Image (cartoon, rainbow, N blue to C red):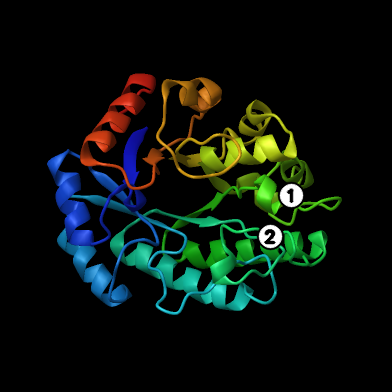
């Protein structure tokens, strides 16, 4: 397993500055997320090729479109536009030789971009089975598309906090609990699907929906290729720094045989704090 650092960790959002800091402290791999400024994919590709001494990963909503929208393949109102965006990102990964592209599983509600991270429980979800079927069918199509560019898709688990918990109905946030894993247990697509496990999301969702973190991790242990690593209080996913207690709670991910990267995803911390977090990971993990 190797360590990568998300662009969201840095207290800046210019690629040149992020790269400069990464080089200074020996970071070899950067995951690019929506916070990074850019002038379009064509310019980005030229810039990233220029930094051939570093490795890059691309996550979900990067590069963020200038006209914001919600990238969600599990709702009919957003699936077409979301697929177009995702396919362009897959092409970019292919051009740059990036083997994985990670993206969120989606949900059966249709929030505005301004409502992300806010209470969404007043929104009316489409029927759960409709959303799940749309997600799986679209995931299959996207993975076939990605195969042309030798890119593998990694599906990230959603977070369900108390603030966006839907009462008395199945949560519309797909891949957020053990029930989802049970529903797809015999599904031919899910059998070979790969995962980016966000442990911050998992901690909050397990607390909200009352399920076992260990059981969830055991069920997906052979699927996990990347981990998003941050901590929180179990109530709000706010990307706080890792502690030794984090590695006790999530001890089972040390048994993930197919894990390639642990990606530090702590929000806007200092250069010194990034170094401390990397050291903490190394002290708790076998890192190559």
Depth check: 136 or 81 in front? 81
Q: In this view, does 152 lie above or below 195?
A: below
Counting from the top left corner in percent of width and height, residue 78 is at: 62, 74
Residue at point 32% right, 62% down?
36
Quadrant occupied by the C terminus: top left
Depth check: 191 or 219 in front? 219
SS for callout 2: helix
Counting from the top left corner in percent of width and height, residue 53 is at: 16, 50
Query: Position of 157 compared to 45: left or right?
Result: right
Q: Which residue is under mark 1?
A: 187
Query: Do the residues bearing badges 1 and 2 touch, measured as CB atoms within 8 Å?
Result: yes
Q: Which residue is under mark 2?
A: 136
What label sits on residue 173 in the rendered view?
Answer: none
Question: Which numbered disc flags the more N-terminal residue, 1 or 2?
Answer: 2
Q: Can you see residue 83?
A: yes
Residue at point 38% right, 23% down?
285
Between disc 1 and disc 2, the foreground one is 2
């Amino acid at each position: 397993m190797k360590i990568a650092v998300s662009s969201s960790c840095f207290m800046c959002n210019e690629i040149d500055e992020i790269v400069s800091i990464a080089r200074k402290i020996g970071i070899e791999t950067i995951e690019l997320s929506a916070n990074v400024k850019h002038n379009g994919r064509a310019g980005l590709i030229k810039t990233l090729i220029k930094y051939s001494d570093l490795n890059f990963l691309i996550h979900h909503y990067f590069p963020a479109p200038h006209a914001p929208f919600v990238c969600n393949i599990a709702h009919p109102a957003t699936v077409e536009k979301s697929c177009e965006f995702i396919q362009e990102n897959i092409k970019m990964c292919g051009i740059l030789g990036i083997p994985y592209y990670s993206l969120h599983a989606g949900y059966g509600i249709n929030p505005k971009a301004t409502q992300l991270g806010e209470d969404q429980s007043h929104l009316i979800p489409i029927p759960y089975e409709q959303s799940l079927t749309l997600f799986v069918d679209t995931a299959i199509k996207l993975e076939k598309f990605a195969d042309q560019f030798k890119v593998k898709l990694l599906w990230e688990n959603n977070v369900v906090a108390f603030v966006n918990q839907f009462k008395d109905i199945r949560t519309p946030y797909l891949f957020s609990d053990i029930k989802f894993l049970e529903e797809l247990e015999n599904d031919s697509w899910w059998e070979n699907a790969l995962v980016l496990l966000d442990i911050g999301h998992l901690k909050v969702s397990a607390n909200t929906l009352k399920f076992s973190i260990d059981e969830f991790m055991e069920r997906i242990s052979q699927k996990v290729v990347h981990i998003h690593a941050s901590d929180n209080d179990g109530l709000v996913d706010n990307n706080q720094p890792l502690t030794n207690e984090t590695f006790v709670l999530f001890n089972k991910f040390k048994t993930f045989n197919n894990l390639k990267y642990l990606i530090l995803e702590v929000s806007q911390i200092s250069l010194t704090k990034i170094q401390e977090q990397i050291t903490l990971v190394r002290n708790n993990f076998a890192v190559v």
